[in-house]
Image: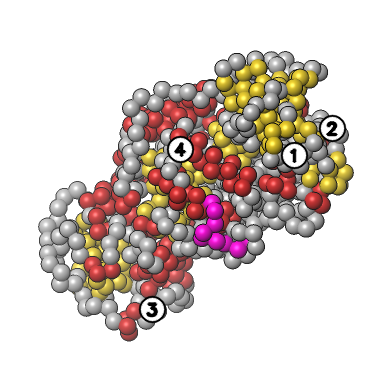
């Protein structure tokens, strides 16, 4: 094996390995290391090493000639082995470049990939350093030329109040989609195929939020079960796109295909948000593999306790420490890269509270990370959406993110499910439960109890997401059915706020099927007629099911791939969803408004009083929003028909009724003030 030395540079280059004329400039952070090597691999996999000089302030690097785009490489680091102090340096382990633009290959969980000594099952002594070489079992970083012809690409820049978000998985959406060529199904290119775009436009989507497309790895226990990490919340590289989602395995083509997807979606007027996971990495807990950051300096990258063990507020084994300037630098560099190089329009942050925890682990709305996003000239101009909780102490923080942040509104999700499903199911069994109409009313008008002085557009309303039951399963299952995940149905949430309407799972009972379809329309109607930014989970508009599995994170198969073989009922549902987004565009007051335009009425058309608001048994409510045009939403959560007198607010027309199997095209003319509502139904009237 040959070893050379990089040429020192007068100034520390940008982090990572970057192509320049004649070679690459290299900068690697390893504050406690005694030696660092850039390891290059030829086409036969033979390794040569380049010793990197110390560059000051914990950095190592220099200029390496005759290394060009396409070169495969890794890093090796030597230094103290002191696990209690967070030092796990081990030159036998080949490490990925944390700033690497591409990753090729997969992790094979042999004992060699662990920095400490383990047996074949992965169990071992975390205090004993392993001498096994990991290079045959870990992926390589790739030097990349990132140039791309963007032409006249420009962000769609939809006004905040016009956004309709579609949460989607690159592979799931098109894996079974007729019209997309077979070799493009389940790929970045498939996501931007004209057939896919036509569906998104028909649905009224403005913004696609993609589940993680950063390079990720499967966890060891999933490999043992013959399963995969399908969702991708297990990051290997924060700058590298996930290569298996591309139709061409060449690393340069992977990035070009991803950029091409963004460009085509932009041309169709659709924004792209990325679901990003900066709270933890694929290295898992202290007993996990050494793949990158742990080998560079675990004490810098991760939150550790006094014994050198991971402080885990993510439930994934480790937590990146954004109080460390180096970690913050990497995250901000990554975000800028995806905006400037890939032209994405914003981000949804997985377990975002973990990113805002200070030195004492308390959440700080003025955390340097949150301040940087607000002040950075690149990042301040894109949308930031928080999943406003994590698994650490006081981890629920909905409504507490600063400034222009938008936040997933779990209270909206829970209230909508409770009113239409859990409480209705309890009523069907003779029980009386729930807060009447108070909670659903609060959610309809933008959750001002959570967002205070901020606009209702800080709320991202959702009823379903990738995690949990689909909308079709919410109305068909009382309990989860996760046996396929290999964990004896112990995984996933046990409290789903669902209602099977009298039969568990599929049924031939026409009455139950009719009620389920109406309940789905109630959920969709509440989502798309409420204030804030609505988010539709992909496939809910066509009645997708996971067969009662509420945690299919490891199911890359027909369970999670969207089934596009639509029957009449599913086509009707898609038409209903499209009609609702069209009404949302037509009636701006539905999307955002101040409190001065809100009027609340009971079923007699009289204004609500303190007494009627306090009635826990109340299940009917009318909401009038003054505007141009105005809107009247009538909510009826009772099990029997209801006689309702519309408030005296001028002439009204019925525009949408969840009792309709398919949207009505004909104008029925002015509505009588005396109306009869179908059990468990929702209506929209406008002038």
Query: Which residues fall within the magenta stretch?
Result: 361-369
Query: Mainly helix, strand or loop, the magenta region?
Result: loop
Q: CA distance from mark 4 to mark 3?
A: 50 Å
Give the labeled residue for mark 3: 617
The disc placed on residue 197 is: none
Give the labeled residue for mark 2: 132
Q: Position of residue 601 (x, y in %)?
A: 25, 74
In the rendered structure, are the residues bearing label 4 and label 1 in contact, judged by CB atoms less than 8 Å apart? Answer: no
Residue 367 is one of the magenta-drawn residues: yes
Q: Position of residue 39 (x, y in %)?
A: 73, 25
Q: Give the mark nearest the N terminus, 3 or 2.
A: 2
- Looking at the rendered structure, the secondary structure element under dot 4 is helix
Between 166 and 30, the one nearer to me in the picture: 30
Mark 2 against mark 4, which lies toward the viewer? 4
The disc placed on residue 295 is: 1
Give the labeled residue for mark 4: 339
- Looking at the rendered structure, the secondary structure element under dot 3 is loop
* Residue sitting at x 33%, y 42%: 157
- Looking at the rendered structure, the secondary structure element under dot 1 is helix
Q: Give the mark nearest the N terminus, 4 or 1.
A: 1
Q: Give the mark nearest the N terminus, 1 or 2.
A: 2
* Residue sitting at x 24%, y 55%: 588
Between 630 and 456, the one nearer to me in the picture: 456
Q: CA distance from mark 1 to mark 2?
A: 14 Å
Q: Position of residue 178 (x, y in %)?
A: 41, 30
Q: Residues within 10 Å of mark 1 (few under 14, many from 20)?
A: many
Would residue 172 be seen by someone viewing this image from the given angle?
no
Q: Is residue 643 left or right of residue 236?
A: left
Q: Give the mark nearest the N terminus, 4 or 3.
A: 4
């Amino acid at each position: 094996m040959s070893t050379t030395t990089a040429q020192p540079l007068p100034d520390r280059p940008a982090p990572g390995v970057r192509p320049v004329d004649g070679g690459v400039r290299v900068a690697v952070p390893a504050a406690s290391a005694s030696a660092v090597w850039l390891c290059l691999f030829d086409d036969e996999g033979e390794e040569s090493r380049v010793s990197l000089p110390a560059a000051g302030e914990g950095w190592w690097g220099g200029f390496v000639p005759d290394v060009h785009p396409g070169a495969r490489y890794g890093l090796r680091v030597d230094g103290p082995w002191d696990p209690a102090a967070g030092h796990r340096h081990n030159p036998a382990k080949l490490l990925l470049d944390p700033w690497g633009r591409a990753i090729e290959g997969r992790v094979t969980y042999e004992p060699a990939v662990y920095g400490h000594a383990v047996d074949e099952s992965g169990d071992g002594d975390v205090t004993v350093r392993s001498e096994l070489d990991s290079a045959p079992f870990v992926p390589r970083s790739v030097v990349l030329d990132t140039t791309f012809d963007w032409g006249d690409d420009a962000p769609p820049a939809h006004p905040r109040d016009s956004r309709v978000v579609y949460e989607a998985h690159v592979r799931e959406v098109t894996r079974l989609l007729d019209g997309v060529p077979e070799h493009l199904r389940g790929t970045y290119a498939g996501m931007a195929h004209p057939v896919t775009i036509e569906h998104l436009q028909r649905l009224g989507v403005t913004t696609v939020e993609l589940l993680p497309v950063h390079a990720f790895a499967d966890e060891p226990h999933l490999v043992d079960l013959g399963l995969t990490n399908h969702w991708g919340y297990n990051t290997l590289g924060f700058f590298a796109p996930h290569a298996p989602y591309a139709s061409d395995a060449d690393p340069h083509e992977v990035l070009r295909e991803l950029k091409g997807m963004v460009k085509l979606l932009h041309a169709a007027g659709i924004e792209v948000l990325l679901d990003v996971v900066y709270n933890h990495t694929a290295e898992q807990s202290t007993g996990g593999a050494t793949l990158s950051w742990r080998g560079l300096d675990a004490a810098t990258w991760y939150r550790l306790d006094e014994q050198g063990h991971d402080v885990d507020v993510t439930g994934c084994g480790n937590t990146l420490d954004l109080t460390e300037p180096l970690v913050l630098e990497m995250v901000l560099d990554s975000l800028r890269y995806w905006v400037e190089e890939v032209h994405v329009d914003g981000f949804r942050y997985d377990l975002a509270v973990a990113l805002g925890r200070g030195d004492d682990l308390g959440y700080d709305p003025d955390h340097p990370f949150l301040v940087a996003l607000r002040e950075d000239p690149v990042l301040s101009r894109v949308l930031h959406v928080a999943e406003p909780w994590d698994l650490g102490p006081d981890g629920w923080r909905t409504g507490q993110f600063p400034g222009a942040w938008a936040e997933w509104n779990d209270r909206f999700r829970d209230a909508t499910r409770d009113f239409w499903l859990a409480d209705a199911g309890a009523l069907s069994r003779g029980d009386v439960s729930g807060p009447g109409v108070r909670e659903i009313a609060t959610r309809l008008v933008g959750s001002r109890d959570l967002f205070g002085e901020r606009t209702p557009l800080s709320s991202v309303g959702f009823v379903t997401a990738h995690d949990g039951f689909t909308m079709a399963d919410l109305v068909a299952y009382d309990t989860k059915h996760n046996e396929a995940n290999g964990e004896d149905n112990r995984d996933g949430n046990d409290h789903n706020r669902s209602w099977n309407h009298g039969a568990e799972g599929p049924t031939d009972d026409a009455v139950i099927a009719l009620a389920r379809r109406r309940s789905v329309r109630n959920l969709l109607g509440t989502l798309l007629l409420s204030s804030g930014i609505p988010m539709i989970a992909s496939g809910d508009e066509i009645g997708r099911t996971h067969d009662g599995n509420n945690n299919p994170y490891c199911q890359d198969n027909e369970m999670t791939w969207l089934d596009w073989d639509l029957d009449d009922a599913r086509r009707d549902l898609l038409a209903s969803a499209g009609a609702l987004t069209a009404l949302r565009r037509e009636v701006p007051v539905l999307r955002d408004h101040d409190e001065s335009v809100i009027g609340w009425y009971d079923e007699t058309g009289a204004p609500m009083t303190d007494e009627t608001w306090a009635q826990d048994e109340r299940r009917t409510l009318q909401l009038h929003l003054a505007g141009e045009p105005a809107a009247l939403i009538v909510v009826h959560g009772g099990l029997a028909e209801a006689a309702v007198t519309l408030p005296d607010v001028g002439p009204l027309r019925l525009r949408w009724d969840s009792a309709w199997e398919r949207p009505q095209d004909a104008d029925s003319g002015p509505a009588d003030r005396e109306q009869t509502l179908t059990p468990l139904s929702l209506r929209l009237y406008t002038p």
